[in-house]
Image (cartoon, grey):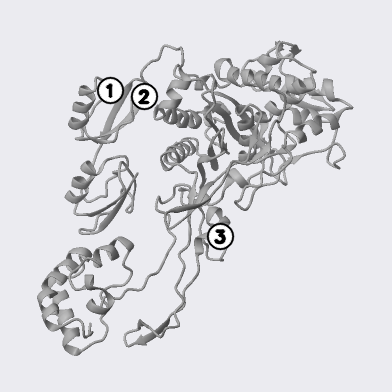
Amino acid sequence: MKTEALTDDIFNENIDSLAYNLSNLFHDKSKQDYKRDLLSARYRGSRYHLIRRNVNYLQLKELKKFPIFRLGQYKGGFIYKEEHKRIHPFMSLAYRTIGNLNKSGNIVGIEGAYNDELNGVQGVRRMQKLSGNIWIPVSDGNEIDPQHGKDIITTIDVNLQDVAQTALEKQLRDHNASHGTVVLMEVETGEIKAIANLALDKNGHYIEDYNYAIGESTEPGSTFKLATIMVALEDKYIDLNDSIDTGNGSVKFYGHLIKDSNYKRGGHGKITVRQAFEVSSNVAMAKLITKYYYDKEKKFVDRLYRMNLNQRLGVELVGEGKPYIKYPDDTLWSGITLPQMAYGYEVQLTPLQILTFYNAVANNGKMVKPKFVKAIRFHGEIIKRFKTEIINPSICSRSTIKKVKELLEGVVENGTAMNLKNSHYKIAGKTGTAQIANKKHGYRYKNKITYQASFVGYFPANKPKYSCIVVVNAPSNQEYYGNRVAGPVFKEISDKVYATSLDLFETGNKGQNIKVMAPYSKNGYLNDLKEVITDLGLRAETKNIKSPLVVTTAKDSVIELNNRFVKTGIVPNVKGMGLKDAIPILEMQGLYVVSKGRGSIISQSISPGTKIRKGEEIVLQLI
């Protein structure tokens, strides 16, 4: 407040404008209150007067432009102390993977892996304590300037992350599941474009508390059948049109009963290897592998090892689960181990390890390491780029890759995942339904079996761009098959990726007659949306619309409109809207709106359904 350069003339000429700007920025005191406080401090001859604590970066930028303050520290007496914090700007999106510093001092996720780069170097400055617990800097020439931390540029696409996380949470709720994970990877580079891990907490909310994709090793079940078939094809014991008799859908090995799922009562009888894979026959896999690898178990497992299935991926994020591919000299190896391994039991892999294996098939045999960070930036300049790392240049022969690609397409076209089939582009992949073993009680506990449903694959099948895995643990609403529980999440993600990617549209439909898909539309006012939809020549489907606001959903070639009601005194849900529609709705409810970003609203700082307090600030994040 008291500096020789800040004369009475300058102060008196600008005090009104400064007080007005401060009141308008913070909305905590009137212009008159600010002016009175500043005049009083100057009259007392105070060397320092605290304006406000905990100012954010955007507010600081505005303060620097205000009258008097814009003169700087020495001429205008404006002093501020910077405090840097790491925040999650997109709230819960990829929360666990982005990482954080927890109360125990442990850092997880990308923050943990790159903490040194993010931290920078702390500066040193002498500070003097004044009355009122106010600290001011003292310049004595011995300061050490701090060095800002570097920026970590992740591979995650916020739009795709939002799609993946929303689709996963909806499916978990619909099936009352314990937890689940989804990972979307770019085939050629290994870049992770989306990764969501959600678990049900004690309050009934799905939160990110553990990275299941990276850390949870479980028996994968039928998704492991791809590796089984590849081993037998590589050793030239089988071909796709060879036949295998599955009988009535059950077979015993050393008294242990192996059964096919009840997709067809009475079993599938005599079928080809191709058909066995498409219908996911456990019996066929067990019989084939036992026939050709009995007394040659090491040959079978060695082939799995050569495809890197027994090795960690070595991702930079801590906590990667260790794969477990049992070897014949293992003390736990038994007479039923080989047939069990054939359809995905007595082995353990994490979802990311399974996805990386399928991604290698999509990538014509080249296995690449999953990548979470693209580059490191300092003051706007890229100082380091991370190249794609190759784990294995060729996990098997080209002929085997060609054959298993046919099999994976067949699963969607003719087999257990026909519900994912569509006319726009082809999906290739494999369903999985595995029983989860209790460590103490085995697969059945209290006369109940717990399941894990999964689907893993890639798209477009003819020229793969993305691979994806979805795993849902312990669905409990009488539905546990991979195609019905995990498959819809995969399809919702692939549909939205495909619909918003022109290059995929051209790749996936070359030479086909294309049916036009409805575009993505923001939620908003009914009349405005109907006008735009009509002008664009699109079709809208409206049923019992009784609200001026609507929620939009793209379904095939139709945009479906549904009611969105706003209750007085309750914070409305404006997610998916643009600012033009959201601001008047919120302001009419008495809220003060602050927006960040552009595009559609992806999060709001006050949860929908909360009771409104007039004048309360609500922050909208757009992307």
**Height in image: 290 above or below 186?**
above
Residue drawn at x 82%, y 23% is 290
Residue drawn at x 30%, y 25% is 559
Q: Relative to 130, is 64 on the left or the right? A: left
Q: Relative to 160, is 457 on the left or the right? A: right
Q: Residues within 10 Å of mark 3 (few under 14, many from 20)?
A: some
Q: Position of residue 81 (x, y in %)?
A: 36, 73
Q: Which mark is residue 541?
A: 1
Q: Which mark is residue 107?
A: 3
Assign a secondary structure to mark 2.
strand
Marks 1,2: beta carbons within 8 A: yes
3D distance between C-alphas at marks 1 and 2: 10 Å
3D distance between C-alphas at marks 3 and 2: 42 Å
Q: Which residue is mark 2?
A: 555
Which of marks 2 and 3 precedes in the sequence? 3
3D distance between C-alphas at marks 3 and 1: 48 Å
Residue drawn at x 45%, y 25% is 504
